[in-house]
């Protein structure tokens, strides 16, 4: 009864301009949302995909198409599925049937340069609400073994716009623009933008330039964020469109790691002027630039003034609270209790 009432009454406030209270409420509310997902209607159908033909389908997209109204689970047996997948129906669950997510891989190699659009390059696109994935790798291998081009190298592994989405034990591999976490819709730069909540736990995301980006309302819990060899590296490019938009990223009890050749690593840069990112109790095992955050282009000064970038209790070789950019914030323990 308590969980049922909690799910019915739970709402998300508009994030204020400072984001101080809103960002931390976001973490709490997304945590509270998880019990609600367990009370969602039971999946009416379970389909099986296998590369060797032993399942009902050999293609993930074919199985998705067999759930036209959603509300089903797709069990994916070990293998490499070189295809693009688009999920528009709600309540779709992708479950990897292997001991490690590296053995169940959905992969493709489209990029901005080949399709003419960054978001259109995604290997997997999810627009349906209440999406769930566990034990799978989503990969875009366009940049494997070659340097990024000045234009056109954006290559998305997973594009997630579905509301109340949950990822567990999922690997997202790419280079530039690996993971897009976006809101449902934004009519213009002034909005309105419908918030889409996303929760990722025990996941792994790797890339080099802006490789976690978009205007979603996302929490990462106990995830590894890995920087590939490149110079410079930007972990995030959050893109909150306007001051009142309910979006932002929270990383809690995560770990940031890097290849030896990763240099000039920044926690993020503002894709739009109200970019919002908070790191809570995260181990920075990579050599983060002391300033921590940077403008979109060197020499600019306007976006960091209106963005909200904050940390609490960062540790590791990349933790430098005394010399962070003065426009970012070091939260006190009391502030995190909000």
Image (cartoon, rainbow, N blue to C red):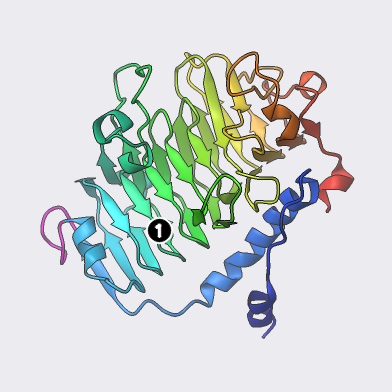
| Figure quadrant of the N terminus | bottom right
- Residue in the picture at 79% in, 51% down: 21
Majority secondary structure of magenta residues: loop
- Residue in the picture at 61% in, 40% down: 254
Residue 119 to residue 196: above or below: above
Residue 121 to residue 259: above or below: below
Tally the numbered discs: 1
Near-viewer residue (92 or 333): 92
Question: In the rendering, at what x and y percent does residue 201 appear?
Answer: 54, 51
Near-viewer residue (146 or 273): 273
In reply to whether residue 55 is colored magenta, the answer given is yes
Residue 17 visible to the viewer: yes
**Which residue is at the far right?**
334
User: Quick one: SS at disc 1?
Assistant: loop
Range covered by the magenta-colored residues: 50-58
- Residue in the picture at 74% in, 56% down: 25
Near-viewer residue (262 or 270): 270
**Label 1, on which residue?**
127
């Amino acid at each position: 009864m308590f969980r049922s009432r909690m799910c019915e009454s739970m709402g998300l406030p508009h994030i204020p301009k400072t984001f101080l209270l809103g960002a931390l409420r976001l973490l709490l509310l997304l945590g509270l949302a998880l019990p609600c997902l367990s009370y969602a209607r039971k999946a009416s159908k379970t389909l099986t995909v296998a590369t060797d033909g032993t399942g009902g389908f050999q293609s993930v997209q074919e199985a998705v198409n067999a759930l036209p109204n959603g509300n089903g689970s797709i069990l994916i047996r070990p293998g490499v599925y070189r295809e693009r997948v688009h999920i528009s129906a709600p309540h779709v669950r992708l479950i990897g049937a292997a001991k490690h997510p590296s053995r169940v891989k959905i992969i493709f190699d489209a990029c901005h340069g080949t399709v003419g659009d960054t978001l259109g390059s995604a290997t997997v696109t999810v627009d349906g609400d209440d999406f769930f994935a566990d034990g799978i790798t989503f990969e875009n291998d366009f940049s494997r073994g070659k340097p990024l081009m000045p234009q056109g190298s954006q290559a998305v592994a997973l594009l997630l716009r579905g509301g109340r989405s949950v990822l567990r034990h999922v690997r997202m591999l790419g280079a530039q623009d690996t993971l897009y976490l976006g809101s449902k819709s934004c009519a213009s730069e002034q909005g309105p933008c419908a918030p889409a909540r996303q929760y990722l736990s025990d996941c792994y995301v790797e890339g080099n330039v802006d490789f976690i980006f978009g205007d979603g309302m996302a929490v990462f819990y106990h995830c590894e964020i890995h920087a590939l060899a490149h110079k410079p590296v930007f972990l995030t490019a959050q893109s909150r469109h306007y001051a009142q938009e309910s979006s932002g990223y929270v990383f809690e009890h995560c770990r940031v790691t890097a290849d030896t050749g990763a240099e000039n690593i920044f926690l993020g840069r503002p894709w739009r002027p109200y970019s919002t990112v908070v790191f809570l109790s995260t181990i920075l095992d990579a050599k983060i630039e002391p300033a921590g955050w940077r403008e979109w282009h060197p020499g600019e000064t306007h976006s960091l003034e209106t963005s909200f970038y904050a940390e609490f209790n960062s540790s590791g070789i990349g933790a430098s609270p005394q010399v962070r950019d003065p426009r970012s914030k070091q939260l006190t323990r009391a502030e995190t209790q909000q």
